[in-house]
Image (cartoon, rainbow, N blue to C red):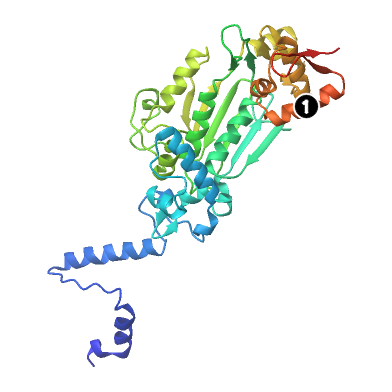
């Protein structure tokens, strides 16, 4: 029987007719190459293998309905303002995603879900960030403060940065040299943000591990389940180097929103900012992932241990925003409550606005307004004079 006329062969040819590509091969080697190429293409179409970046691959089970149109509008607005992004705010979701190459055969990629998804962790469960604050210099229970942040990549970065800045020391100056009150954090915010955004941008999203941000008494550690590009070494990170993003589509959108640059300058900037702030240079290491270690100022901590004294958690023009410390095997900070921080700030700088107080203690303006209203009601605080030009009085 002629195999070409076998009923099953005819049925197979009929089913595959629309997808069949006829080619002529002269040698068996050419045939083998063609078969391998077709096999790879089929496996890619079935999402069984991946040859490109993970963030460019289709996110299984995700559709355009899983993406937040309002988040996309906010992105366009920010990108237009900060990077001259060409699309208008009324651009459709399809137009934006196409422009950013975030669609794969019309379906959302992993990058699209991580950047604009209503709930990215539904599809990529480990894309959260875990933040922990330890009073000592090592991981130990109980953990005084622990947060797991979920959401889009932009939100994760903002929340993790806020977590760190709300727990490190800060100094607030006066208006003697400018209209705004200067605020100086113990670790430059630029360094904190760079370490965290790099972890989010360059991590391995196929890993079940999550980005971890751990603040200790002597250092800040940012760990991500990823590694360096083969083109980079730990030593090269300390020198000018090229940019080799692990997730290039995510990196492009983070660049457009001005969360990162594209010149490989991030680690160098961290070193410079730390040096200018009088801190030790940050350290970069590869263990079971990539770790950035940023060292805190240790003089106050060392003095507290040696002299058994209370340790300031920040200075306000010579007035300490302080908390008591129990000196034992591990120095322990007792967090200062928001009302107490407000009173100490206003006692030192009566002409501060509530917005400036909120900025200084890294709280929302609404939270400071609520706390201040309660202090006024409890007769711990009062405002004297007109709305503009008045000042605060702390009542004892």
Residue 28 quadrant: bottom left
Q: Tag count in the figure?
A: 1
Q: Residue at x 81, y 17 (%)?
A: 382
- Residue to which mark 1 is pinned: 371
Q: Position of residue 238 (x, y in %)?
A: 39, 23
- Left or right? Give the position of 103 relative to 13: right
Residue 157 quadrant: top right
Does 138 appear above or below 89?
above
The quarter of the rendered structure image containing the C terminus is top right
Q: Residue at x 46, y 39 (%)?
A: 201
Q: Residue at x 21, y 73 (%)?
A: 22
Viewer-side residue, 95 vs 231 = 95
Would you say residue 287 is visible in this rendering?
no
- Left or right? Give the position of 222 relative to 349: left
Q: Position of residue 228 (x, y in %)?
A: 41, 36
Residue 376 quadrant: top right
Which residue of the protein is positioned furthest toward the bottom in this rendering? 1
Q: Position of residue 317 (x, y in %)?
A: 66, 8
Q: Residue at x 44, y 18 (%)?
A: 272
Does 313 appear above or below 293?
above
Circle 1 crowding by C-alpha within 10 Å: few under 14, some 14–19, many from 20:
some
Which residue of the protein is positioned furthest toward the front in this rendering? 386
The quarter of the rendered structure image containing the N terminus is bottom left
Viewer-side residue, 252 vs 77 = 77
């Amino acid at each position: 029987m002629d195999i070409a006329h076998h009923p099953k062969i005819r049925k197979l040819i009929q089913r595959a007719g629309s997808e069949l590509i006829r080619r002529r091969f002269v040698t068996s080697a050419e045939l083998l190459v063609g078969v391998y190429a077709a096999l790879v293409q089929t496996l890619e179409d079935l999402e069984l293998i991946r040859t490109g970046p993970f963030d460019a691959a289709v996110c299984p089970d995700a559709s355009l309905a899983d993406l937040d149109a309002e988040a996309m509008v906010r992105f366009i607005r920010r990108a237009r303002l900060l990077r001259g992004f060409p699309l208008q705010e009324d651009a459709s979701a399809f137009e934006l995603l196409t422009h950013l190459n975030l669609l794969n055969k019309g379906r959302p990629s992993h990058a699209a879900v991580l950047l604009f998804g209503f709930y990215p962790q539904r599809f990529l469960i480990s894309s959260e960030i875990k933040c922990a604050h330890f009073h000592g210099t090592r991981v130990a229970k109980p953990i005084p403060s622990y947060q797991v942040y979920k959401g889009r990549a932009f939100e994760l970065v903002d929340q993790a940065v806020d977590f760190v800045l709300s727990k490190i020391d800060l100094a607030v100056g006066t208006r003697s040299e400018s209209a705004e009150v200067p605020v100086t954090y113990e670790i430059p915010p630029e360094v904190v943000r760079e370490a965290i955004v790099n972890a989010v941008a360059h991590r391995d999203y196929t890993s079940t591990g999550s980005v971890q941000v751990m603040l200790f008494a002597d250092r800040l550690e940012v760990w991500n389940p990823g590694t360096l590009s083969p083109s980079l070494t730990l030593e090269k990170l300390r020198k000018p180097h090229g940019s080799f993003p692990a997730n290039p589509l995510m990196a492009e959108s983070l660049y457009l929103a001005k969360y990162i640059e594209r010149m490989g300058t991030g680690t160098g900037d961290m070193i410079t900012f730390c040096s200018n702030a009088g801190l030790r240079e940050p350290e970069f290491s590869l263990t079971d992932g990539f770790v950035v270690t940023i060292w805190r100022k240790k003089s106050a901590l060392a003095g507290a241990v040696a002299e058994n004294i209370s340790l300031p958690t920040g200075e306000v023009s010579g007035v300490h925003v302080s908390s008591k410390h129990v000196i034992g095997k591990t120095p322990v900070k007792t967090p200062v409550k928001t009302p107490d921080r407000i009173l100490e700030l206003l006692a030192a700088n009566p002409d501060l606005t509530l917005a400036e107080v909120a900025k200084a203690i890294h709280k929302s303006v609404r939270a400071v307004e609520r706390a201040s209203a309660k202090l006024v009601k409890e007769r711990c605080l009062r405002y004297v004079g007109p709305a503009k030009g008045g000042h605060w009085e702390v009542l004892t």
